Image (cartoon, rainbow, N blue to C red):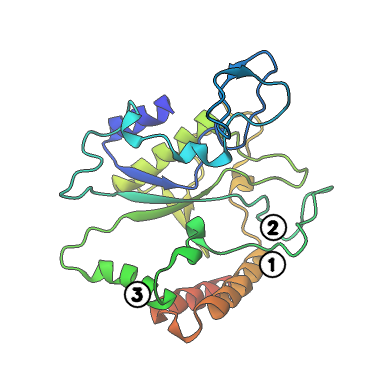
Amino acid sequence: MASVGAKMASFGARVVGFGIKMASFGVTPIPVPPSMPHSDPKNPSTVPKRNRDPEPCAHPNSRFCAPADQCPIMDPHWDDPEGVPIDAIIFGGRRPRGTTAPPPESPPPPPGGRLMHDPFAMRPFFGYNAGRYLEHWLSTGERRNARLPRFFHVNWFLRDNEGRFVWPGFGHNARVLAWIFGRIQGKETARPTPVGLVPKEGDLDLEGLQGVDYAQLFPMEKGFWEEECRQLRDYYGENFGADLPRDVMAELEALEERVRKM
């Protein structure tokens, strides 16, 4: 995380990362060794004790409870009441596949489980008509002199056909951030694809990464994206219906046309 903070400071960009796990700390409960004294969060009245079972020492959501101002690399103006410029918003995915063929011996999906096209799992928290909610955000771009952030999408969990992760993750994610900072600064380091802009080969720093294949990082299989479009259309129909903003549907229709020509 310190290296990521250094990248942010050296480039002077402000980035908001959503759903991105830069490291595994706090993502899943870690059993405490029997010899380690600790306090039980489920029963605060018990002072430090020694764990005699694999009960997790922290609630899975405890990672959300640390005050942001305790971060040593936090920008001092991160909560400026006059507003904070946002240069980029990064959406993170946990998709193991980028093709229609699942890896061998891949686990089956949970019963009744399906992909939810719901950024930040925010749907249950819409306080009013979801279509109007989207319109509200889209209207931000219509404001005079609006300086909109760029949107990026990352997926640290993509696997190859053998079931191996195609990206090493952890500190190497700073390589992706460096590319993002370059884009914010206006560097021409992206190439167009039917589904968006991706790094040009050679412009994403892969130096020293053994076994990392550029082609595997950005799979473009028509069948996969056809299914993706179908799922998006179903999601919009089920959750927004006639209230879906026309601009959103126009983006989907344009994507469907580009995928059709792949």
Q: Residue at x 67, y 40 (%)?
A: 165
**Where residue 71 sits in the image (x, y, percent)?**
35, 29
Q: Is residue 5 left or right of residue 161?
A: left
Tell me the kind of residue under disc 3.
Glu
**Where residue 106 sits in the image (x, y, percent)?**
80, 49
Tell me the kind of residue under disc 2.
Thr
Task: Say above or below: 244 vs 127.
Answer: below
Q: Is residue 233 left or right of residue 96?
A: left
Q: Nearer the viewer, residue 69 or 35?
A: 35
Q: Residue at x 76, y 57 (%)?
A: 109
Badge 2 vs badge 1, beta-carbon distance below 8 Å: yes
The answer to whether residue 195 is visible is yes
Tell me, for residue 99, which label it has, or none.
Answer: 2
Which residue is labeled 3 in the image? Answer: 135
Which residue is labeled 1 in the image? Answer: 223
Q: Quadrant of the N terminus?
A: top left
Q: CA distance from mark 2 to mark 1?
A: 7 Å
Q: Nearer the viewer, mark 3 or mark 2?
A: 3
- Image quarter of residue 222: bottom right
